């Protein structure tokens, strides 16, 4: 039975007695692209929850160092717990919390989440998701599509329900199919984990990533199947819906992705009163990493985020704590120095200091950008009040404002991340320039 304990606080539709500080990290991850397959195919061997549990136990015994590091989490600079541990992902996927349009838990500034009042069990002083009906789960917006990028066992749900699985509620029956086996080894490994063959095995990515996904180095692709800009799960009801996804039709650079999202009406929230759209795009990580200097030099996600490490007995293994900051990993910093040492950066401390300085520069640029955005929005709201929200003369400035917020969110990559923390992973200076230009052009279009 899935239960979560908490302390009280008031909230609309929430318990006035209980609130939980799960500090969950949103791992909202989707997969997109030109459709390469019809539907999401099942794995050759579909595991039951019982066999899943035994497989996890066996792998934990076979590969203790890898498995133990996989189950680690950390609290980031924002006070939010991040990581891919099965227990942590269960909190994200199964806790009866208030959720956004994509089904992700809504976090307050302090990292807390509001719990759904109907799930509270006064006898146990806990929140129990099993107390909620399918109708209540639907109102909470907890869908099975949420786990399409967190476990290969979504395939088993899909095998039973078809494409409707993306929008169907993640109820007790569906949760039993997953069996708590989140971020399972089969996400990234072909066969046994020590086979040496890596592959992005999430079937949704295989069905929609198209030629873009096919071109990726496997050490990038296994991360790309989750860390991409897609936001299409909620729109999938039929196989035709799934087949129609063509998310890289305009290209994969930041402007092409904006164009596609703008055309399809995804990755944006539109205010009903003003008609002003703001982007909420999450983790367009792989797209923004493509064609960077890092990638040109052959650097992959695995190199920095899953470095080779040595155990106390000298055994070498791949560190699977991929959510760990490379700046907090001696092994990751040692890898960075294989290039940066030639540029005069001699020690791990120097490498970390160099990177933090770049992060500080980006954070300052983002703070300035947000001031520009605020001024732009205020002017746009004023213009809407004067001319009406449907005035065609406001179409251009509205799109430019949406574009400015798009660049901003791409720089942020997600609400869990501290401003500037992504400096090493993208060409942030050019993105900042684009965002600033969008604000300036928009203000000019408004005659300001």
Image (cartoon, helix red, strand yellow):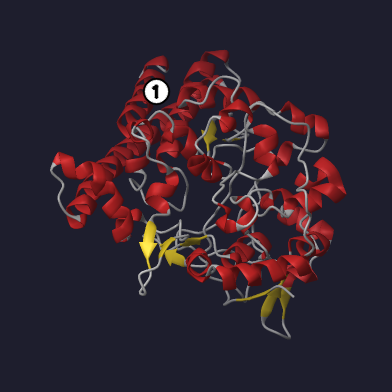
* Residue drawn where x is 47% and y is 50% of the image: 415
User: Vertically, is 41 above or below 21?
Assistant: above
Q: Nearer the viewer, residue 79 or 402?
A: 79
Indicate whether 64 appears above or below 215.
below
Judging by the rendered image, the residue that carries numbered circle 1 is 438
Bin the neighbour count of mark 1 within 10 Å (Cα to Cα): few under 14, some 14-19, many 20 and up.
Answer: many
Question: Would residue 28 be visible to someone looking at this image?
Answer: yes
Closest to the observer, 337 or 155: 337
Picture quadrant of residue 241: top right
- Quarter of the picture containing the C terminus is top left
Left or right placement of residue 139 versus residue 21 in this view: right
Q: Horizontal and vertical percent for residue 89? A: 60, 62
Q: Is residue 349 left or right of residue 289?
A: left
Q: Residue at x 40, y 38 (%)?
A: 411
Quarter holding the N terminus is bottom right
| Relative height, residue 446 to residue 57 (above, below) | above
Percent coordinates x, y for residue 200 in the rendering: 60, 43
Q: Quadrant of residue 367?
A: top left
Spot the residue most to the right.
160
Whether 281 is drawn above or below 262: the answer is below
The residue at the point 56 percent across, 63 percent down is: 113
Q: Position of residue 48 (x, y in %)?
A: 80, 63
User: Can the viewer see residue 143 in this picture?
Assistant: no
Whether residue 86 sits left or right of residue 254 in the image: it is right
């Amino acid at each position: 039975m899935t239960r979560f304990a908490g302390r009280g606080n008031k909230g609309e539709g929430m318990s006035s007695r209980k609130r939980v500080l799960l500090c969950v990290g949103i791992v909202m991850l989707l997969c997109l692209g030109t459709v390469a397959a019809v539907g999401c195919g099942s794995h050759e061997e579909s595991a039951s929850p019982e066999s899943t549990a035994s497989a996890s136990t066996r792998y934990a015994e076979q590969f203790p160092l890898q498995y133990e590091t996989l189950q680690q989490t950390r609290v980031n600079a924002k006070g939010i717990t991040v990581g891919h541990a099965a227990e942590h992902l269960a909190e994200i996927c199964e806790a009866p919390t208030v959720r956004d349009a994509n089904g992700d838990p809504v976090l307050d500034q302090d990292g807390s989440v509001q719990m759904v009042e109907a799930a509270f069990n006064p006898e146990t002083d806990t929140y129990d998701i099993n107390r909620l009906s399918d109708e209540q789960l639907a109102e909470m917006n907890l869908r099975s599509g949420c786990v399409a990028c967190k476990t290969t066992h979504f395939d088993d749900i899909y095998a039973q329900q078809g494409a409707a699985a993306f929008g169907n509620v993640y109820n007790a029956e569906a949760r039993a199919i997953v069996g708590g086996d989140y971020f399972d080894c089969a996400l990234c490994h072909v066969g046994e984990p020590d086979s040496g063959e890596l592959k992005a095995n999430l079937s949704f990515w295989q069905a929609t990533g198209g030629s873009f996904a096919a071109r990726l180095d496997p050490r990038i692709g296994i991360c790309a199947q989750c860390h991409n800009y897609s936001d299409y799960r909620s729109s999938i009801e039929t196989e035709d819906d799934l087949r129609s996804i063509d998310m890289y039709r305009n290209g994969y650079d930041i402007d092409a992705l904006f164009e596609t999202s703008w055309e399809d009406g995804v990755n944006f929230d539109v205010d009903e009163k003003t008609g002003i759209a703001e982007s909420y795009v999450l983790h367009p990580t792989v797209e923004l990493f493509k064609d960077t200097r890092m990638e040109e030099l052959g650097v992959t996600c695995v190199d920095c985020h899953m470095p080779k490490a040595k155990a106390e007995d000298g055994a070498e293994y791949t560190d699977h704590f991929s959510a760990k900051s490379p700046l907090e990993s001696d092994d990751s910093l040692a890898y960075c120095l294989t290039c940066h040492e030639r540029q005069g950066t001699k020690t791990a401390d120097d490498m970390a200091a160099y990177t933090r300085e770049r992060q500080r520069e980006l954070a300052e640029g983002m703070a300035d950008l947000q001031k520009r955005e605020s001024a732009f929005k205020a002017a746009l709201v004023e213009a809407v009040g004067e001319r009406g929200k449907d005035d065609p003369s406001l179409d251009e400035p509205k799109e430019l404002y949406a574009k400015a917020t798009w660049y901003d969110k791409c720089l942020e990559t997600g609400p869990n991340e501290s401003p500037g923390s992504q400096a090493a992973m993208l060409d942030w200076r050019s993105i900042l320039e684009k965002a600033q230009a969008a604000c300036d052009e928009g203000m000019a279009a408004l005659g300001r």
